[in-house]
Image (cartoon, rainbow, N blue to C red):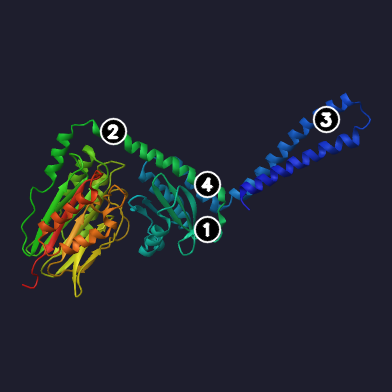
Amino acid sequence: MTYRTERRLVASGATAAAALLFLIVPYTALRGLRLDATLALGAALFLALYIFREAIFQAADRALYRRRFRRPETRILLGFADRVGASFTVLDLVEAIRDCLERPADMGAVLVRSNTWELIYQSSSAAATDPKVLEALERNFRDWSEGFSFINEDYSISNTNEGARGFFVYAKGFHFFVLTRLCSLIELEAFRTLYGELKIYFDRVITISDLFEVASLSKEWELVAETQRSFLPKKLPTVAKLDLAVSYRPLVNVSGDYYDAIPIDEARTLLVVGDVSGKGLAAALVMGIIVNTIRVAEDKADLAALVRSVDAAVRDMGFDDKYTVLFLGLVDTAKKSFRYVNAAMADPIIVAQTALGPKVRRLQPTMGLVGLVPIEGDIAVEELPLRTDEIILLASDGVTEVANADGKRLGEVEAFDRTLLQSVKLGAEGFVGSLTSLIYSFVGDAELKDDVTILAAKAGRLWD
């Protein structure tokens, strides 16, 4: 039974008791009085009983509230709701998660942007970082409407907190998951309170971001665009056994996208593609800092160290709302290998050569966003074998997320994979050209809504 239900029962009981006294007392004690005196005394008695009823109800309600809301589990969630109410940035929210949920109660949290399912924050707990758990959460909850609900043991939707594996809130375009086995011990009203605070919080974040974008629009855009272009390579390098090509098309004259290809030695080349949140002068400056940090790094083959350097550089700039998604890939034609870190980039792809012909292989994220909060723990670096004629495709979300007039996204239609497989025999320039043509034919009369950046690297004859 919930707090609201018990509260209604207490109110009904107090009202019933007062009504019974009002009926009994005049009947038993006032039968000898005249009608006018009886009515006057009845009115006075009604007022007294109403005051009595309110006193009884308030006392019982306070006792009920203390019994339910002083449970330590409920106090933990309400304490987190209070911190959310005082938060204004994503960093504030992350600190509240760590201080109020992770440390005192070992709760795991996952925060994602709903439309792109971009991972903004995840706790370091096993469940919150398990790729299978994250896949199940996206499969079962991505299309959920605004509100909150609970998570079953198999990470499906539950309508009750009894025996729940966790809970989630969907508000203002964000999904917030908390994985904990304490749900059944927490008062249901506390979840409603948290949902309300999160709605207000995300409204604040969106409003602040919109104000920043409006302010950015008042700046000299051409100067910003020129500043940004100066950070990007004027042309891609010529690399033995590796064919490189790029297409870079900002939606407006400035972009949050960036790319680079940096030869380390005769065999190794570092590929870089990323996207800074927002646009305008701040995004261009952050982009420049990122590109420069990578270029001046002493050991460009240490991908984990590069990510940490970028993370520190972005945070040192002091923008509360600036972060980057980032892909770093190290091609080694001598060892015939490809090592990479994928920090929340949308669908990097390898068109792999197999015994059955070319196959599209998507590279899943290995970590979350960079530059938002300090990175804790080790950074996973994945490694794949690289074969002759395989193509590495690194593209911003303006490629796979681009939508046609019917609302279908390019990355979800069969024509996308088919074009990649049919273009694998072309050089890197032809491959990028085929994909670019597909984007514009797919969009048709609809308008592009994001920047389009495509970097392709095709392996040459690696056995020579």
- Which element is circle 2 on? helix
| Pointer 1 residue | 182
Tell me which numbered mark, 1 or 2, is placed earlier along the sequence.
1
Tell me which numbered mark, 3 or 2, is placed earlier along the sequence.
3
- Please state which of residues 296 and 438 is positioned toward the viewer in this rendering: 438
| Pointer 2 residue | 214
- Dot 1: few (<14), some (14–19), or many (≥20) neighbours within 10 Å? some
Tell me which numbered mark, 1 or 3, is placed earlier along the sequence.
3
Tell me which numbered mark, 2 or 4, is placed earlier along the sequence.
4
Amino acid bearing label 1: Leu
Q: Are marks 1 and 3 in contact (CB under 8 Å)?
A: no
Residue appearing at x 45%, y 62% in the figure: 155
Tell me if residue 396 can be seen.
yes
Amino acid bearing label 2: Val
Query: As displayed, is residue 118 above or below residue 15?
Result: below
Amino acid bearing label 4: Arg
Residue appearing at x 65%, y 45% in the figure: 7
Give the number of the disc on residue 42: 3
- Which element is circle 1 on? loop
Q: How far across and down, in percent of the image, does residue 38 sit?
A: 87, 28
Apparent side of residue 140 relative to residue 1 in the rendered image (left or right)? left
> From mark 1 to mark 2, how far is it between C-alphas?
43 Å
Q: In the image, which is nearer the foreground, mark 1 or mark 3?
A: 3
Query: As displayed, is residue 463 above or below residue 209?
Result: below
Tell me which numbered mark, 3 or 4, is placed earlier along the sequence.
3
Apparent side of residue 374 relative to residue 29 in the rendered image (left or right)? left
Outermost residue, right side:
32
Q: How far across and down, in percent of the image, does residue 47 sit?
A: 76, 30
- Dot 2: few (<14), some (14–19), or many (≥20) neighbours within 10 Å? few
Residue appearing at x 87%, y 24% in the figure: 36
Outermost residue, bottom side:
355
